[in-house]
Amino acid sequence: MPTEKEKMLKGEIYDPTDKELTQLRIRAHRLSQQYNLTSDTDMKQREDILNVLLPNRGEGTFLQSPVQFDYGIFTRVGKGFFANFNFTVLDTCPITIGDNVFFGPNCSLYTAMHFLNPAERAPRLREDGSGYDLEYGKPITIGNNCWIAGNVVICGGVTIGDNCVIGAGSVVTRSIPASSLAAGNPCRVIRELTEVNEEPKY
């Protein structure tokens, strides 16, 4: 019999009130809160917190507080990762982020999903009278060398290819191919990015 955590990570329907998952969430919320009380100069303290909250991270990871993780341990970021203020991560399914990815302020990654049918979404009662609901999730994958501008929401099931730029305020509900400039709500590809048309002009 798979555990609720195993079902959750596979994107299957699961019970989020499961004891193991509840304990992991409480720990991540507490660690997020502790991280948010630190300053940019508290590098050792931040490193100690991230070793527990976000152990699967590459060299040079920097998170500008405040941050909020549902679990943290189910998120993997590559080297040179940067996230600005108010980085929110609901990692009920695996989140994988490549190398040299930058996030602007107020960005959110939501792997958590809920049923469209209100009867399926509604809270339920066990025989002992305790409440629960059923949920599921979809993973998020972001490739290398991406820039995610401010106030972007990335929804479950999305893959963003390498070398993409996602414009400010976008809501990404569908996958974006590599080397794309994409923006909007819903987010759509505006044009392909190439070395020729993206040379810096000084």
Image (cartoon, rainbow, N blue to C red):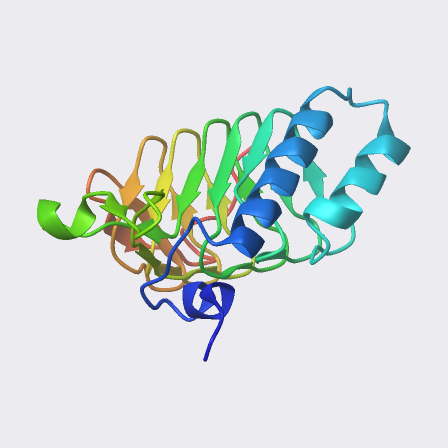
User: Residue 50: x and y, percent?
Assistant: 75, 43
Q: Residue at x 35, y 39 (%)?
A: 153
Q: Is 144 above or below relative to 87?
A: below
Who is closer to the viewer here, 17 or 188? 17
User: Residue 184: x and y, percent?
Assistant: 23, 38
Q: Residue at x 72, y 29 (%)?
A: 35
Who is closer to the viewer here, 194 or 179? 179
Judged from this view, the residue extending furthest toward the right is: 44
Residue 186 falls left or right of residue 89? left
Q: Is 149 above or below relative to 97?
A: above
Q: Is 202 above or below relative to 182?
A: above
Q: Residue at x 18, y 44 (%)?
A: 122
User: Residue 57: x and y, percent?
Assistant: 70, 55
Numbered-mark total: 0
User: Residue 32: x and y, percent?
Assistant: 64, 32
Which quadrant, please, contains the N terminus?
bottom left
Judged from this view, the residue extending furthest toward the front is: 128
Residue 35 falls left or right of residue 150? right
Q: Is 127 above or below relative to 139?
A: above
Residue 77 falls left or right of residue 55? left
Which quadrant, please, contains the C terminus?
top right
Name the quadrant containing residue 37: top right
Judged from this view, the residue extending furthest toward the bottom is: 1
